[in-house]
Image (cartoon, grey):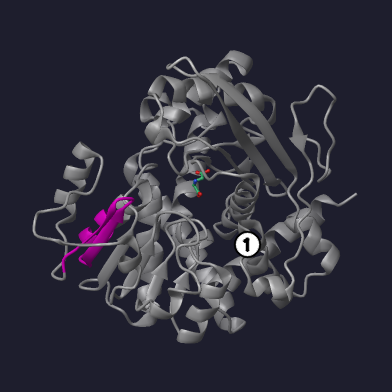
Amino acid sequence: MPRDRRSSNTPDDPPENTGGAATEPTAAEAGQRLTPFQAVNLQFERAAELLGIPEDVRIALKTPYREVMVELPLRCSDGEIRTFSGYRVQHDNSRGPMKGGLRYHPDVDLDEVRALASLMTWKTAVVGLPYGGAKGGINCDPHTMDPHDLEQLTRRFVGRIERFIGPQEDIPAPDVNTNPQVMAWIVDEYAKYHGYTPAVVTGKPVQLGGSLGRESATGRGLLFTAERAAADLGLELKGATVAVQGFGNVGSWAAQFFYEAGARVVAVSDVHGAVFAAEGLDIPRLLEAAAKSGRIPTGAGEETLTNDELLTLDVDILIPAALGNVLHLRNAPEVRAKLVVEGANHPTTPDADEVFRTRGITVLPDILANAGGVTVSYFEWVQNLQRFRWTADRVDTELRTTMNTAYDAVREIARQRSTDLRTAAFALAIERVAEATTLRGVS
Ligand code: GLU
């Protein structure tokens, strides 16, 4: 891959936007509604300021390496032609191949993908993986699509981006509404251009070279970091009350692991709403029912709440594990948790973050707390490259070591610099990326 940060493309490349110079939000904008990329960059700026990073270096670090946007027309099984937009934003590759998920959601747009790609750069750096950051997505709704159409759309997308991805270039993975089946289609389609290459994507089915423990990894990582943060706060996890927003791959596993650790999980939710039981929910029963019906069951004695009500419950630990921006200026003053564990990417807006700082609520930031997923993705990639398979125990042990090491390093910076965990995590990541960039040389 060319090393210059703004490489141009050959004329036959698909439409590609190489813009996206990272503009800094002004102070006035900061109080207003920020785009997701501006919000991430505000967090970046707080840490860059603390480190005294010069302005020219900041711009280089914030600006995406490459942004690919593709048109995806598809003749659907109902005979209609529908046109979707696909994105792959490659944010930084100074520390290794770029890495990050693929999101299928009607709200996917370039700015959001840019924000998520940059978060991946900082996330992989916080946990010390030899990767940069990327993210992709398609503005489709898999819940309303015919599965055959979804497969064709995925294959068409791979056809448009295959020249930009690869085991040493950029390695996609699951994200919101994508899963091992989607990754399997990617492996198969990529093979048509480059031969069978399982290391091109992670989060694959185990039968196709996926890693044991990958599906549960983000939830497990949330527990590992929360255990340490709770200990620092003098909060006993056993018996602590927990509310989890989101019952997808992250939220459902998190609910299970906190339940197994002896916490009282009093509320969980999906897109339809939340269920609440003060004495604690029977999480295994809910998981089993949700696996059958595709949603959290109601009517078995638990109270029902809205998703908004769940966020302001009187609990010790709040885990937003659905979409972004759910904790904002309007509800942040009402949040009663002592510890917020960010299972989702950017669930907290910068102004809500400020409210939490003032109110003494500890936030375990996304780029640390939910890094368990990409960490086991890294283990999967390593296993694929070595053509070797790790046991589930080995995956869990190595994941625990990685998460604990990262948490301890972030907490140390937070203590030394008297700052919050998010700013400390960004500071650790920025230092690592800046060092790699300088060592490789900017020409
Ligand atoms: N989508 C996940 C994340 O946001 C995992 C990415 C990966 O495994 O590459 O961290």
**Does residue 431 appear anywhere in the picture?**
yes
- Is 260 colored magenta in this rendering? yes
Q: Residue furthest left?
A: 301
Left-right relation of 84 to 58: left
Picture coordinates of residue 51 (x, y %)?
72, 74
Picture coordinates of residue 326 (x, y %)?
45, 63
The one of 59 and 53 positioned closer to us in this rendering:
59
Question: Helix, strand, or loop for circle 1?
Answer: helix
Left-right relation of 151 to 276: right
- Is 28 colored magenta in this rendering? no
Image point 29% across, 62% down: which residue? 306
Quarter of the view holding residue 208: top left
Above or below residue 254? Residue 242 is: below
Quarter of the view holding residue 17: top right
Left-right relation of 288 to 71: left
Image point 20% across, 73% down: which residue? 239
Q: Residue furthest right?
A: 443
Total number of numbered discs in the rendering: 1
Residue type at tag 1? Val
The magenta region covers 255-277
Picture coordinates of residue 356 (x, y %)?
48, 79
The one of 267 and 204 positioned closer to us in this rendering:
267
Q: Which residue is mark 1?
A: 40
Quarter of the view holding residue 424: bottom right
**Does residue 261 appear anywhere in the picture?**
no
Above or below residue 3? Residue 339 is: below
Classify the position of the N terminus by image quarter. Answer: top right
Picture coordinates of residue 413 (x, y %)?
59, 76
Q: Is mark 1 within 8 Å of ligand 1?
A: no
